[in-house]
Image: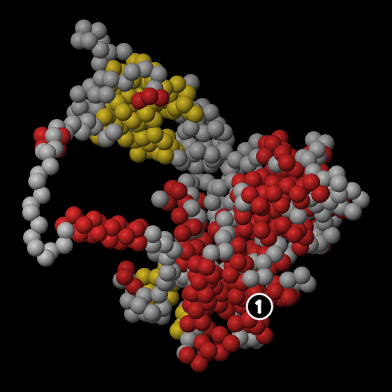
Amino acid sequence: PEHLKEPLVYMRKAQGSWEKRILKSLNSMCTELSIPLARKRPVGEQKELLNKWNEMGTDEPDLSLFRPVYAPKDFLEVLINLRNPNYENGDSLSFRTHLGLIQVPLKVKDIPELKEFFVELGLTTGQLGIDDSTQVPPELFENEHVRIGQKVLAEQDSAAAQQYIRQGSPTALRAELWALILNISSQPEELLYYEQLKTNVIQHDLLVDSLIYKDVKLTASNDDYYFVFEDYLYQVLLCFSRDTSVLGHFAYNSASPPKSYIRGKLGLEEYAVFYPPNGVIPFHGFSMYVAPLCFLYHEPSKLYQIFREMYVRFFFRLHSISSHPSGIVSLCLLFETLLQTYLPQLFYHLREIGAQPLRISFKWMVRAFSGYLATDQLLLLWDRILGYNSLEILAVLAAAVFAFRAVNLMEVTSLAAAEAVLADLSTLKVMPLLQIFLFATVT
Amino acid sequence: MSRVSVPCHVKGTVALQVGDVRTSQGRPGVLVIDVTFPSVAPFELQEIMFKNYYTAFLSIRVRQHTSTHTPPKWVTCLRDYCLMPDPHSEEGAQEYISLFKHQMLCDMARVLELRLILRQPSPLWVSFTVEELQIYQQGPKSPSMTFPKWLSHPVPCEQPAPLIEGLPDPSRVSSEVQQMWALTEMIRASHTSTRIGRFDVDGCYDLNLLSYT
């Protein structure tokens, strides 16, 4: 069974050590602040929370003592130190030396393989994000594409939708298309389930809730696009932590849910529970996975289901150590390999000035670019994640961004300056960048 | 089809290398593992199962028991079976593999000895081998059951006993009972699989600290 989660033993071990660190950090926060991990709310407090359910953002609890359990850069340090004990690194530079930060020899696709994999993004195929711009007459591509989209929705064909969305989704159809691809139905059972989760939130107060609050306040609330959705984010994320059905994804996730025991019953298996109930401890920036979805879905139960499905299909791979081709380790290696192979001068230059490119692009990939790109561009990118059922496009986009700003980057002389060049991605158009990098760069 | 594990004795790996092992720079790229079956008579091999550890290609040679006069010879039954599509990267490096009789090039009856030849051409790996080697032979076939006579030759219908006054017709009652039973079966079968999702123990979720095990 562990083999199904992750076949490579040393990666399982690394994930285990990383999880231990997180647990220790959470436990020490618990003891330092003298706040219990979980607490049943008194009835008065329950009523108050129920009344305030739709405006939890107005609550201003004192969160100054809380700190996020970890941030992406801590995770990056762990990945940098990942080593295969059977791998001969050698002291001298040879063909086997990895010049980037990631030192494990995972198999990643090269550009010819990526071209084949992402064939629908090619220059001769119409794309939303390129061929729907104002200069292009809609008769050429856009109208027909919308028509096909409506037909796919009418047929309720999930596989066809997945194929269709590789060329992008029209804004009007996107919410339904994603629901179709993710197999989200609007059954009353699901609504009931969501209400049940809401009741769980009202009844018990978890330490993790404060972490969620803090994260939302630090990230989404400060973002120009997403601050309006603050209340939705609480509604989704607090319910998410109570959702035990998420535990199912740990069968194929290399991570394992943290365990705890009911007070006074340490060691007794009948009193062992998972904490938080869904087994996922949020980190700094976690709420950004939910924020873009708020543009598409306004009904909390549907929004919740979509987010949960996106998480157990894709997002969990971005913060657990595994050898999966869509896992964050492979994405980092893919990014570094693409950059080294196709922009060797830039890579060498950045390395020389102490600005390893992965240090800048890691945070983009961990958040699936949420909060860095403009929202419409982000949704076009996430269309392709759904369409290709793979996160590799994140690494390709990261490399494409570097290629786009290569001229400026060649002139910088420090990591801080490189960060500054790449600080603002909000003006970038995702699809042209991807197309140029994959199909139009002279290799 | 059932399978039965065959106890085997796995001899230590022998590295094949040109030149002196101690002085030459590179690591051996070929290892040979001999597998003998000391306590078992020549058997028919059904399946070989093992866990790979960074071996790229596997060849297997088998020595079979032929007729009593001729000495048994080595025959290659699997040639260069690829375990790692890219010997330099981790794909397939620690996978569980099963090899079956029908994948072999020759007949696997009356096996005496096996020799596994492991190849790993890439110099990146410190060592390579296969682990948890298990050999299986065909298990006993389930014996065919002979049907009891009365199942295959049902007796002709008996004459129903005469109805007792006042009681309902038994055949009608039995058909109604059958319908009721079918209903209960339907209800039992259609219960939803969605869990209630309780995460607490008897309403209590008062926790200690997180445990590290």
Residue that sits furthest to the front in the current view: B165
- Residue at the extreme bottom of the image, as rendered: A44
Where on the picture, by quarter, is residue B68?
top left
Q: Which quadrant of the view contains residue A141?
A: top right
Q: Residue furthest top?
A: B69
Q: Is residue B155 above or below residue A236?
A: above
Q: Residue at x 27, y 26 (%)?
A: B36
Q: Residue at x 30, y 26 (%)?
A: B45
Quarter of the figure with the C terminus of chain A: top right
At 56% from the left and 89% from the top, the residue drawn is: A48
Q: Amino acid at mark 1?
A: Asp
- For disc 1, the marked residue is A231
Q: Indicate the position of residue B146 as horizontal and vertical percent values.
A: 14, 32
Quadrant in the picture for residue B12: top left
**Could you classify mark 1 by the number of other residues whose Cα lies within 10 Å: few (under 14), some (14-19), or many (20 or more)?**
some
Instruction: Tell me if residue A285 comes above or below residue A1 in the rendering.
Output: below
Pick the residue in front: A335 or A207: A207
Residue B14: percent from the left, percent from the top?
38, 27
Residue at left 45%, top 55%?
Answer: A251
Residue A236 screen position, x and y as percent: 59, 71
Please provide percent x and percent y for residue A29: 52, 78
Q: Do we see residue A101 in this rendering?
A: no
Identify the colour scheme used. secondary structure
What's the chain of the residue with tag 1? Answer: A
Circle 1 — which element? Answer: helix
Q: Nearer the viewer, residue A225 or B62?
A: A225
Left or right of B170, for residue B112: right
State whether residue A17 is above or below residue A106.
Answer: below
Q: Can residue A116 be seen in this snapshot?
A: yes
